[in-house]
Amino acid sequence: MKTVDRILGHLVSCKDVTHLLSEREDRALTSFERIKLEWHLAVCKACMAVEKQFRVLHEAMRRYRQ
Ligand SMILES: [Zn+2]
């Protein structure tokens, strides 16, 4: 990964990312928000795990609604 990407990833806080992940369940994110998520998820293992949990949850909710 390029150093600049790494720096950008760390500029986004874990709190912001968690917030964006829950927002994503309710609305479409803007392209800048999606980029911020990608930057951070590339450098933060903790948020990557949270993102995975959201995916599982999202999938479960989708099945439940059907
Ligand atoms: Zn994080």
Image (cartoon, grey):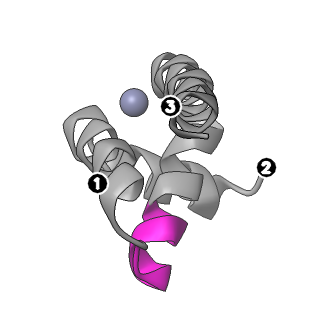
Quarter-wise, where is residue 5 in the image?
bottom right
Q: Marks 1/2: CA distance?
A: 27 Å
Q: Main secondary structure of the magenta part?
A: helix
- Per the image, the residue denoted by label 3 is 61
For residue 16, above or below residue 53: below
- In front: label 1 or label 3: 3
Q: Amino acid at mark 2?
A: Met
Give the residue at mark 2: 1
Residue beneath disc 1 = 23
Tell me which amino acid carries mark 3: Met
Q: Is mark 2 within 8 Å of ligand 1?
A: no
> x%, y% of residue 49?
56, 17
> Does the magenta portion include 49?
no
Mark 2 secondary-structure assignment = loop
Residue 63 image position (x, y, % from top left): 64, 31
- Residue drawn at x 41%, y 72% is 29
Left or right: 22 as drawn, with respect to 48? left
Ligand 1 placement by image quarter = top left
**Segment colored magenta:** 29-36
